[in-house]
Image (cartoon, rainbow, N blue to C red):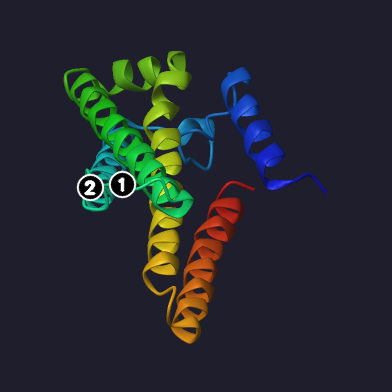
């Protein structure tokens, strides 16, 4: 069985190379795609990205030491902020594009621009994943002198991240 990263790459490649497959926009069939669905999808992605990007921004601070864990937390938060901001802004631009088109024109545009359409989602996945990882690392570092809670929080964080990954895999299988 293929690894998770390989499955994600195969999914992305299949989504972008097959013009009959509109799985980049969740839809049961090619005919189900609508302007309302496009608007809802970019709105939901943009709002969630803005929220998570704002949370990640709270983890950034200017006094980072040379400790590997601090650098890791900073870099994960930095990537989360930038990926989520890009997702949010791209979603806003796509929303505006779809909102100024007729229903048929919006769907036609989406079918011709799959890579651009999937960009906010992929940036959100990257930013969200980095955010969750940064929170796990942040609690692991903060609780370094309390091993029971350190590993309890690590377990809870890894379980939470696993639920997100399993949901992603189930939804996209």
Q: Name which residue lies at 58% across and 46% down.
A: 172
Q: Nearer the viewer, mark 1 or mark 2?
A: 1
Q: Name which residue lies at 60% across and 52% down.
A: 169
Left or right: 65 in relation to 46: right
User: Residue 140 versus residue 68: which sits nearer the camera?
Assistant: 68
Give SS at disc 1. loop
- Camera sees residue 11: yes
Label 2, residues with CA under 10 Å away: few <14, some 14-19, many ≥20: few
User: Residue 79 versus residue 2: which sits nearer the camera?
Assistant: 79
Label 1, residues with CA under 10 Å away: few <14, some 14-19, many ≥20: few
Q: Which residue is mark 1?
A: 64
Answer with the quarter of the image where residue 120 lies. Answer: top left
Q: Give how far across and how far down residue 31 sits, in percent.
A: 48, 31
Vertical side of 134 occupied by 102: above or below: above
User: Residue 40 versus residue 90: which sits nearer the camera?
Assistant: 90
Q: Give how far across and how far down residue 32 sits, in percent.
A: 44, 36
| Labels in figure, total | 2
Vertical side of 143 occupied by 88: above or below: above
Q: Which residue is mark 2?
A: 61
Q: Give how far across and how far down residue 115 sits, in percent.
A: 47, 20
Give SS at disc 2. loop
> What is the CA distance from the residue labelled 1 to the residue labelled 2?
7 Å
Q: Are marks 1 and 2 in contact (CB under 8 Å)?
A: yes
Q: Residue furthest front?
A: 66
């Amino acid at each position: 069985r293929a690894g998770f990263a390989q499955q994600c790459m195969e999914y992305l490649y299949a989504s972008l190379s097959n013009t009959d497959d509109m799985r980049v926009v969740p839809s049961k069939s090619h005919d189900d795609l609508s302007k309302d669905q496009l608007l809802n999808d970019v709105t939901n992605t943009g709002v969630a990205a803005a929220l998570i990007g704002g949370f990640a921004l709270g983890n950034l601070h200017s006094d980072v030491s040379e400790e590997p864990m601090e650098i890791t937390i900073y870099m994960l938060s930095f990537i989360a902020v930038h990926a989520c901001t890009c997702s949010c802004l791209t979603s806003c631009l796509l929303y505006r594009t779809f909102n100024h088109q007729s229903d048929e024109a919006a769907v036609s545009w989406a079918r011709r621009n799959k890579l651009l359409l999937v960009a906010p989602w992929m940036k959100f996945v990257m930013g969200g994943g980095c955010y969750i990882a940064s929170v796990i690392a942040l609690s692991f570092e903060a609780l370094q002198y309390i091993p029971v809670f350190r590993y309890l929080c690590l377990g809870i964080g890894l379980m939470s991240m696993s639920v997100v990954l399993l949901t992603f895999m189930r939804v996209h299988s």
